[in-house]
Amino acid sequence: MEEVPHDCPGADSAQAGRGASCQGCPNQRLCASGAGTTPDPAIEEIKEKMKTVKHKILVLSGKGGVGKSTFSAHLAHGLAEDENTQIALLDIDICGPSIPKIMGLEGEQVHQSGSGWSPVYLEDNLGVMSVGFLLSSPDDAVIWRGPKKNGMIKQFLRDVDWGEVDYLIVDTPPGTSDEHLSVVQYLAAAHIDGAVIITTPQEVSLQDVRKEINFCHKVKLPIIGVVENMSGFICPKCKKESQIFPPTTGGAELMCQDLEVPLLGRVPLDPLIGIQEFCNLHQSKEENLISS
């Protein structure tokens, strides 16, 4: 896990990448290069593009495997229940794009028009974009350095024709590195409503999530709140609740109290979630066979 130093001078500081606390930081070279302070012309282009997007929400977590993509997908589905609300779901996990599989859209292709890339639509009011749609096979490995990943995120924000959108939900990879710095930098001028941070109850997850909260403070990203995922498991047969991931240090509730951030709620482990994702995948494969 890549940690932002507690006394980081910040990407906008004259000491960015040069201070004593910058030594050993994974983002040192990026900050020292001035990439965090030199205006990128794409920022204004993205700002203009994002004028049609009312709300922008990032889904973050310092820890992998806590359910960011699953939560992002369910949040998008939940908001899209209102047919008058237009939703966009953007997957910027460049090396591990799982949104196409979770949404049942594996095998779909991105099409280009005069106004840019067209997202893949699950419903008339729910569009999805992911690097997974650009790969020839879901098993293909994306072996890219930071600048190429940043360029892909820039393209997603600048060149996708989302149209009029009420909510843009951005699913991110674990950590506090290139992808996170890029999306915050590119969307800063367009105004980000904030971040929803996902954790699980055990301390090994909370440790990394505290770093993610620290990252949000450093880059001045508002925190909407924290969601504790996999919070208990209720047996579908006996209805007894078990703690698969015991909250040995008080779980997300105590962490949120200590760090003064809102706890939005808890989501239990539910076998129906896995079953639904399995059904989405097979429905997608059947539709691809029919269309071919």
Image (cartoon, rainbow, N blue to C red):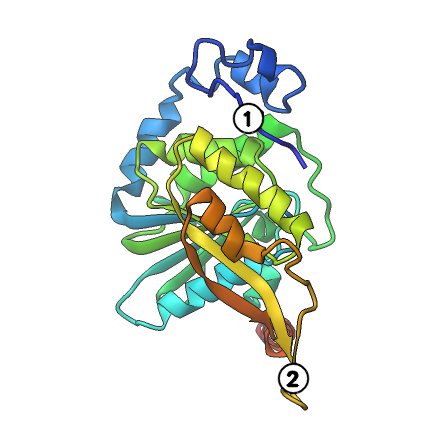
In space, the residues marked 1 and 2 are separated at their CA atoms by 42 Å
Query: What mark, if any, has residue 97 been given in the picture?
Result: none
- Which residue does the image show at 41% across and 18% down from the upper left? 12
Residue 44 in the image: state x and y as whole percent. Answer: 31, 28
Q: Is residue 13 left or right of residue 148?
A: left
Nearer to the camera, 180 or 47: 180
Regarding residue 282, the answer to whether it shows in the image is no
The quarter of the picture where the N terminus appears is: top right
The quarter of the picture where the C terminus appears is: bottom right
In this view, 96 is above or below 150: below
Regarding residue 103, the answer to whether it shows in the image is yes
Query: What mark, if any, has residue 6 been given in the picture?
Result: 1
- Which residue does the image show at 66% across and 29% down from the upper left? 145
Q: Quadrant of residue 246?
A: bottom right
The amino acid at mark 1 is: His
The amino acid at mark 2 is: Lys
Residue 72 in the image: state x and y as whole percent. Answer: 49, 58
- Which residue does the image show at 55% across and 26% down from the upper left? 6
Callout 1: helix, strand or loop? loop
Residue position for label 2: 240
Residue 61 in the image: state x and y as whole percent. Answer: 56, 47
- Which residue does the image show at 48% across and 45% down from the upper left? 258
Callout 2: helix, strand or loop? loop
Residue 217 in the image: state x and y as whole percent. Answer: 43, 33
